[in-house]
Amino acid sequence: MSGAEMIVQVLADEGVSAIFGYSGGAILPTYDAVFLYNEQRSTAGEEQMPLYVPANEQGAGFMAAGYARATGRVGVCLVTSGPGATNTVTPVRDCMADSVPIVVICGQVPTGAIGTDAFQEAPVPSIMGAVAKHIFLVTDPRKLEATLRTAFEIARTGRPGPVVVDVPKDVQAWEGEFRGSGKLPVPGYRRRMQELSEQLVTAHEAEKFFEMLRSASRPLLYAGGGVVNAGASEALGEFALTFGIPVVTTLMGIGSFDTTQPLALRMLGMHGAAFANYAVDDCDFLIAVGARFDDRVAGVPAKFAAKAKRIAHLDIDRAEINKVKHVDWSHVGALPEALRALVSFGQDASFRPDYSLWHAELAALKRTHAMNYDRASSLIQPYYVIEEINRHTRGQAIISTGVGQHQMWAAQYCDFREPRLWLTSGSMGTMGFGLPAAIGAQIANPNRLVIDIDGDSSIRMNIGELETVTTYELPVKVVVLNNNGDGMVKQWQKLFFKGRLSASDRSLHKKDFVKAAQADGFRYAVRLDRKEDVPRVVRELIEFKGPAFVEVMIDPDAGVYPMVGPGQTYTQMITGEFIASRHDVEIKTPGPAEMF
């Protein structure tokens, strides 16, 4: 086989069902190999490996990320050298920050031309080495096959992440024997992975954990994106329900625990539910699972969960233990096995706690500090639109977002019954993520409802991907909440910069999003600007067979509340006009009949 044919065959062997990428001179041999592979499969009546072409390479990277986030499988991005490779830097860093497994295969100038500033050459190893989980430059074509298999192994194992493989054009053109097996020798990495797989919760560790749990009257689970990435959601749910321990999640942990469950306290943090943040303040034993105490959750680490007498932490990555917040008990290893071991130990020990008083306190918090907004306003409130979407989807649709106010509103007002339904750029906060991620998720889940809830500024970043939706007739639903600007930036400018809207106001811009969608082939593309039309338009959007687009002209002054300012604690949380603050109300603990 040629090197290019080997690349395609390894992708097939790894179970890749879709490739996302943009062609160019240095990757043409591999693109031709994809064409020939699919042509042969078509002739034989066998399943092909389709190639989806975006508007630009950043879109391809985010499509691969959406595919990976929605399935847990490795997403694949195939791009050319130079600008093709550098355009994927942001998606690679985004995947690294959120622990998402993708493999990016870049074309490169011929081996002999590397370092000569050849046409469309970029120092990919130097650039990507700082942002990827691992980077390979293949200069020995005999190692190409093994390198690609190793790339997939590294991407999906341990703490998942992006791996970049830089393949010179002459390596793609080289011909040699395809072995069909074999990987590179990476003994240090494999030793660490083996050690992780052997790290089981011992009886002694479990006993220490339950000693702390027995002494607690207000335990709380704090679940992060690691629960989703590890496939540990079922085990987390079993642990929480077995012992009656309430659950808060991070932005990335949304969906790790069914938000409609009575024990669910939804999202904590800078824009978390007020009752979730107050629960963190009140708990006496915090159990962090696959979470990392980041600055949007623990803005002041010393005062985060200040009443907790003990903190436990379970994670796949040893570097996260005691990195931000000191903990009293920790376990590094696979999360599903660890959680199930604790459940088994507790059941064998006949541990049956009574947290009814704690449940009653939380029920009062949820009722008193519920999410709310100006429901009497004549303007379209974004929360109302998302509530109406949620009424139809019932927590079973895949929701992707851009980054900004719309992202937080979707996190606050949408339900998620299971993991991998919530796709958002968490740590990097990359505007433009929502639309291409929705495309990747829809391709991975062709029979599932996929909705991109976006903002007018965020969707501008990758608005060219509207055409990608219609080109492939993907039934993605796009909702643009238009408040004429960078809404989250404007909110911060109003709060912290005396209302000076420097470069964030788009009210004078001439963009007609509906015409743009129509020009890109959307047969259903409407503008929603009357409150009374919200139920009808949302229903039409969801029921439309095929791609559909709605621009919603929302209240430009709608804010995201609650809000914990940077460097502030949950006691300083701003709840806005319509969500009760703990400082303003006296909570009455309900009787047994009112408890959840």
Image: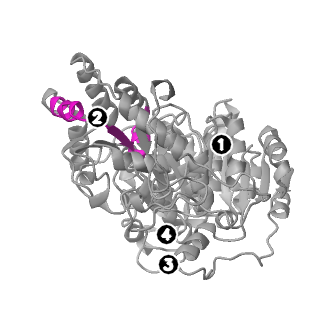
- The mark lying in front, picked from 2 and 3, is 2
Q: Are marks 2 and 3 in contact (CB under 8 Å)?
A: no
User: Is residue 212 a member of the stretch shown in magenta?
Assistant: yes
Which structural element holds mark 2?
loop
Name the residue carrying label 1.
442
Q: Position of residue 317 (x, y in %)?
A: 28, 48
How far apart marks 2 and 1 lie (CA) works out to 44 Å
Q: Position of residue 6 (x, y in %)?
A: 48, 46
How far apart marks 4 and 2 lie (CA) works out to 63 Å
Which structural element holds mark 1?
helix
**Measured along the vertical axis of the image, is residue 279 above or below residue 236?**
below
> Which mark is drawn over residue 118?
3
Nearest the viewer among 338 and 248 is 248
| Residue density around tag 2, few if under 14, some if 14–19, many if 20 or more, within 10 Å | some
Q: Are marks 4 and 3 in contact (CB under 8 Å)?
A: yes
Name the residue carrying label 2.
217
How far apart marks 1 and 3 lie (CA) works out to 38 Å
> Which mark is drawn over residue 109?
4
User: Which span is picked out in magenta?
Assistant: 206-233
**Residue type at mark 3?**
Ala
Residue depicted at 34% across the width and 29% down the height = 355
Nearest the viewer among 507 and 215 is 215
Nearest the viewer among 321 and 411 is 411
Which structural element holds mark 3?
loop
Disc with the residue nearer the chain's start (2 vs 3): 3
Residue depicted at 50% across the width and 39% down the height = 255
**Residue type at mark 2?**
Ser
